[in-house]
Image: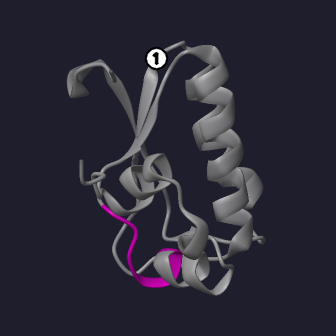
Amino acid sequence: MPPLIDEYILVELPDKLNIRNISNVYDLIYPEMESGKSLLISIPKGVDADLSFIQLIESARIRAKTAGTHIVMSSPAEGSVLNVLERGGFAQTFSPEDKKFWLHEEAIQ
């Protein structure tokens, strides 16, 4: 079970989450992961995202899981983030865990 929300480090991302600045986004996320705390990722409305952002987040999720921490999004994917997930074929193959992370959907029991 994930820790309480006040045990998360808030990481507020810029409005450009694309290949041109993905190293800056990496620099916002990965150093915070070194703390051993879970992360709450906040993405601004109207963000410009591409596949490099999805790859970075998926990599961070794997790393967090192996470290025994969590990454959660403050709000469900929308706009260009959701568009990239759909166009890239990710949304069609989401596991229940992926749906919970990206879309904030719980599996029906």
Residue type, label 1: Lys
Q: Quadrant of residue 76?
A: bottom left
Q: Is residue 77 magenta?
A: yes
What residue sits 37% from the left and 51% below the top?
Answer: 100
Q: Viewer-proximal residue, 55 or 24?
A: 55
The residue sitting at 66% across, 76% down in the picture is: 50
| Residue shown at 56% from the left, 82% from the top | 86
| Residue 46 spot, x, y in % from top left | 39, 81
- Looking at the picture, tell me which residue is in the foreground, 65 or 75: 65
Position of residue 99 relative to residue 12, above or below, is below
Residue projecting furthest to the front: 109
Q: Is residue 39 above or below residue 51?
A: above
Label 1 sits on a secondary structure element that is loop
**Residue 99, image x and y in percent?**
42, 58
Q: Position of residue 93 (x, y in %)?
A: 60, 67
Pointer 1 residue: 37
Residue 100 belongs to the span the image colors magenta: no
Q: Nearer the viewer, residue 15 or 2?
A: 2
Region of the chain picked out in magenta, as a range: 76-81
